[in-house]
């Protein structure tokens, strides 16, 4: 047996080992993403060539074994609108929409290990900066929320973030338990327009199911507000879920000084696209006010709707759209701002329920919808 970063090599595959002192993916991954993808592609080609022989197996936590065959793996884009960086995922042969592991550094990493850390300093809300943290964000956002823990009632889940999305992950007891992302003031709304956000906007937020009702939604909302103390107005991206409204109500009752600053907004967020959240809560709690105030809570972003209606892949296959380079520069600069202004964290005990701020909705794929075309092995948007 060969040892590598706490993983055990057995034939041509790796699986996680829970030995004491193990280093996890986010603690060790510091390579070039293109090199990691080349390794994954080489491994996939090996699976295809060996499809006629007896396959190796992956031991799923809990004891079940899954055969490692090309029919059970697929490549998916790590970032929105960027086809050059993809991850190789292992799916359950009985349910192609259930992801079991991610292939990185020549290892198959179970999902629960991807979102863990052995670094004691990685605690509280940490700005996403490294490739390992980007992968943790993707797993939390696209796989754990989008496929495993998302509510089937809203039939939707977040699209992948961009490569330079400003986001923070909340770490607790060695595990990533929540995240939120921000569209920074001055950053482009999307690659199809020259419009820029007119205020900082909290765009996505998610708390893992087993950590809900512990005050983490309020904690992240408080961090967001404290990160932009110089701003007179802050936005939360429309549509806001009912659960997120409950978080906002508790937060604004606890911090009344923020009642004038928080707005539900549509991009780019000028005054005609804003509704004060506290006012809306008060109006909707009044029988006579329910029909007077409100933004549609099921409205998609225009760019996302365009993608869905065309039934195209998440990631366009040709180059970068005009303005992407400018957006990347804006986002990188904005990330520094978010990091430098972040406050010391406050442990809020007032709870929140499901804090899924469901932005960037799309319909769930049907059975087997996880696996795309065999040649490209990418997710496709359901029309």
Image (cartoon, rainbow, N blue to C red):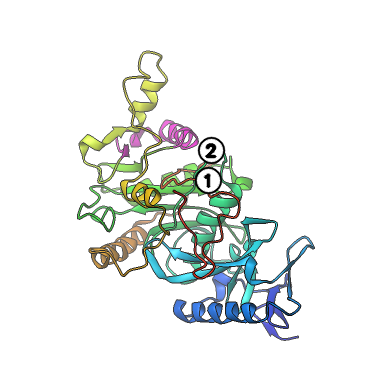
Residue 177 appears in which quarter of the rendering?
Answer: bottom right
Q: CA distance from mark 1 to mark 2?
A: 7 Å
The span shown in magenta is 241-265
Foreground residue among 178 and 214? 178
Q: Is residue 262 above or below residue 198?
A: above
Q: Residues within 10 Å of mark 2 (few under 14, many from 20)?
A: many
Residue 229 in the image: state x and y as whole percent. 30, 48
Q: Are marks 1 and 2 in contact (CB under 8 Å)?
A: yes
Residue 208 in the image: state x and y as whole percent. 58, 49
Q: Is residue 8 magenta?
A: no
**Residue that label 2 marks:** 352
The circle drawn on residue 344 is none
Left or right of 150? Residue 381 is: left
Q: Is residue 258 magenta?
A: yes
Residue at the limit of the structure toward the right, as seen here: 63
- Residue shown at 27% from the left, 62% from the top: 327
- Residue shown at 44% from the left, 57% from the top: 160
Foreground residue among 343 and 319? 319
Q: Residues within 10 Å of mark 1 (few under 14, many from 20)?
A: many
Residue 301 in the image: state x and y as whole percent. 34, 45
**Mark 1 falls on what kind of element?**
helix
**Residue that label 1 marks:** 216
């Amino acid at each position: 047996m060969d040892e590598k970063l706490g993983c055990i090599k057995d034939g041509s595959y790796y699986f996680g080992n829970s030995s004491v002192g193990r280093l996890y993916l986010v603690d060790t991954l510091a390579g070039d993403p293109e090199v990691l993808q080349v390794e994954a592609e080489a491994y996939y080609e090996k699976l295809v060539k060996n499809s006629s022989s007896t396959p190796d197996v992956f031991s799923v936590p809990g004891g079940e074994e899954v055969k490692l065959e090309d029919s059970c793996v697929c490549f998916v884009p790590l970032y929105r609108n960027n086809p050059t960086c993809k991850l190789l995922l292992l799916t359950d042969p009985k349910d192609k929409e259930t992801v079991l592991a991610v292939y990185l550094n020549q290892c198959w990493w179970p999902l629960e290990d991807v979102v863990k850390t052995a670094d004691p300093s990685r605690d509280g809300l940490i700005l996403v900066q490294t490739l390992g943290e980007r992968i943790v964000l993707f797993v939390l956002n696209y796989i754990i929320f989008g496929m495993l823990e998302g509510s089937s009632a809203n039939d939707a889940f977040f699209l992948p973030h961009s490569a330079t999305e400003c986001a923070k992950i909340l770490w607790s007891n060695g595990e990533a338990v929540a995240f939120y992302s921000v569209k920074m003031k001055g950053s482009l709304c999307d690659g199809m327009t020259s419009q820029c956000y007119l205020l900082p906007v909290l765009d996505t937020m998610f708390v893992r199911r087993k950590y809900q009702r512990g005050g983490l939604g309020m904690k992240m909302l408080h961090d967001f507000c404290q990160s932009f103390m110089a701003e007179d107005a802050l936005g939360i991206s429309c549509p806001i879920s009912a659960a997120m409204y409950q978080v906002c109500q508790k937060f604004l009752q606890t911090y009344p000084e923020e009642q004038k600053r928080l707005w539900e907004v549509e991009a780019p967020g000028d005054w005609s696209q804003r509704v004060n959240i506290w006012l809306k809560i008060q109006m909707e709690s009044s029988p006579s006010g329910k029909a007077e105030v409100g933004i549609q809570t099921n409205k998609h972003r225009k760019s996302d709707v365009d993608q869905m209606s065309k039934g195209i892949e998440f990631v366009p296959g040709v180059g970068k759209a005009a303005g992407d380079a400018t957006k990347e520069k804006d986002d990188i600069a904005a990330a520094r701002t978010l990091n430098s202004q972040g406050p010391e964290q406050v442990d809020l005990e007032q709870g929140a329920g499901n804090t899924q701020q469901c932005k960037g909705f799309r319909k769930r794929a049907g059975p087997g919808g996880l696996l795309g075309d065999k040649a490209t092995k990418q997710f496709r948007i359901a029309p």
